[in-house]
Amino acid sequence: MTRTITPRLRTLVLLLLAVTGALFAGAAPASAHAALTGSDPAQGVVVDRAPTQISLTFSEQVAMGDNSLRVLDPKGKPVQSGRPANVSGTTYAVRLHAGLADGTYTVAYQVVSADSHPVAGAYTFSIGAPSRTVVSDTGAGAGGGPVGRLYAVGRYLSYAGFIVLGGGAAFVLACWRQGAGVRALQRLVVGGWLTLTAATLGLLLLRGSYTSSGKLGDVLDLDLLGQVLQTKTGAALVSRLLLLAAAALFVAVLFGAYARREEEEGADEDAAAERRDLGFGLAIGGVVVGAGLAASWAMAEHASTGLQPGIAMPVDIVHLLAVACWFGGLTALLVALYRAPADTPLGTGAVRRFSRLAFGSVLALVATGVYQSWRQLGSWSAFTDTRYGQLLLVKLGLVAVMVGLAWISRRWTGRLGGTAEAASEAAEDAPQAEAEEQAPLAATVPSGAAVAEAGETGPAAEQEAPADPGRAAQLARQRAAVETARRKRVRDADPSRAGLRRSVLAEAGVAVVLLAVTTALTQTEPGRTEQEARAATAPAASSPADSSGALTLDMPFDTGGKNGKGLVRIDLDPARVGANEMHLYVQRPDGRPYDIPEVKVALTLKAKKIGPLPVTPEHITTGHWAADGVQVPMAGDWEVAVTVRTSDIDQVTVSKNAQIG
């Protein structure tokens, strides 16, 4: 039977590795989880005088190093002074040298968001007038390149190692205690521990380069490693390593003292009580260590920042533990179904206990997943409009497939052991098959009659055969092999077991792909943040707009006095961040141009508490005013307010909102 299964397993593993590789190869560098929502000076503006400092505002708090915020002059020379500082909330600033010359300056930033992911970008502003600049590479290599890909693989392996370690141990303690003595399960759990430990060490070494230069040569930079150890992510990785030391002790006791006590036979009450106490202690210790390991992710990633971190972190811990119990337990069940020895068969009770454990894990995943989805998306549109939402839809689809396969597995579990007649028939046929298999053995071992024909007496022959230790040992080994084969035939006589194997194998295959998608989700900007950043930098949408992209706003007014009614029309071209040309027309109700004593304009971005920014247009001709170089510092939903005065005492302010950016 092994010969027919092995090619299938090999093909499935190769397919899953290919899918996983495609997911990683197609993934872009880690997306920023903090968005730049404002700056002073703003992007693209032209200021009359050189500013004394540059300030940036992000959607959440970020971590900055000495070179996280750089300002380069038109020749590419740094002009910042000192290190960046947090001036208020999520706003960070760096001071500039005095006496900066006119020209175009480049602001480059490279920081780490509160959920541990690197954020990098650059923009320009001008002093006096725009100029040519030689700045082309701002050094924003964080999160990408070979280091970024290695870091993504390390994250995947760390999740996989945790799931196999935690889920495999939970399967042994909660579902199949006899499995503590099965070598295949021991290798599985120890392999999970080794994978998680190696991946954690790799992430710790890669972290400095991953968040800064992105160069492989900086992986072993001790200065960068020292800086990493002072960050929240570095502390989380070190904590994980310390907890893995405790996990090693847990694994040693589980597969050492606990396995030996489970193998002991007899009904001694003291021994049974000792086994129960040891199992209870291992269960409590395993939960504590598992929760601690899960917390090492929760304290440094999405759950630690944004909305309701006090609730999100415990929810994230429960979510990770539920994933480990389901996926890791499923892996252990698959190994037990295929690799459990014939003298320690996987019983129906163990399969049913795992079925109940998996069902509880699914319920926990649904409850915690709904909360996490609401927290990270914030709106239904984010499911389709953001990459995070699209990946989440893929994950939900894969979970649905796994639940369907789990339902099939539960049906096979219900049938498992129900075909007792088939098992009995196999047991009845076993002696005959054993005799057939032992026939070749009889031909290789000399009998008393054969020895007598050679001229020796029967008693002498009977004493000679067992007197040969080598021949006796060979006979014992062959008989043991025959007995093992017989037990395997009896064990595998139930057709429901074969069906359960296939369904569990399919579940495990989907779980591998699902884990890859989940890892990609942890490196993707949450939908809520992406939509907020998009709203802050959305292109202008006006009513109505001409083909050139100019914004046109019509606002009727009534000052209440004589000849106080009319219409004011504003044209803003190109209606984008930076310098714009504004034309203002005032008309009477019949459409004729209307000269009035005074007209003023003010722009306000209430969402960011910017403004009002006054605009004083110059009178051009009857009913026509204009202003050049109207600066719009940031994209967003701007309120355009126009104050119209038709006499010494009759005045009114009308306003309209429009997307400018």
Image (cartoon, rainbow, N blue to C red):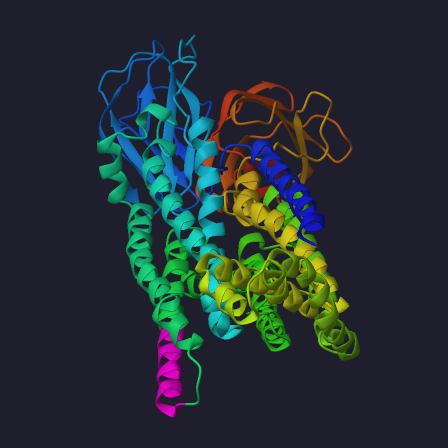
> Residue 268 occupies which quadrant of the picture?
bottom left
Whether residue 590 is visible to the viewer of this picture, yes or no, is yes
Q: Image height check: is 452 above or below 415?
A: above
Q: Where does the magenta region start and end?
A: 268-284
Q: Is 190 colored magenta in this rendering? A: no
Residue 428: x and y in percent read 75, 76
Q: Is 273 colored magenta in this rendering? A: yes
Identify the main secondary structure in magenta: helix
Q: Image height check: is 281 above or below 405?
A: below
> Residue 372 occupies which quadrant of the picture?
bottom right
Residue drawn at x 26%, y 37% as measured from the top left: 225
Quarter of the image containing the C terminus? Answer: top right
Q: Image height check: is 370 above or below 559?
A: below
Whether residue 637 is visible to the viewer of this picture, yes or no, is no
Q: Nearer the viewer, residue 270 or 574?
A: 270
Q: Nearer the viewer, residue 341 or 595?
A: 341
Residue drawn at x 51%, y 64% as measured from the top left: 465
Q: Nearer the viewer, residue 644 or 613?
A: 613
Residue 9: x and y in percent read 65, 47
Residue drawn at x 33%, y 49% as measured from the top left: 237
Quarter of the image containing the N terminus? Answer: bottom right
> Residue 450 occupies which quadrant of the picture?
bottom right
Residue 530: x and y in percent read 55, 43
Q: Image height check: is 365 above or below 214?
A: below
Q: Is residue 651 left or right of residue 314?
A: right
Q: Is residue 310 left or right of residue 87?
A: right
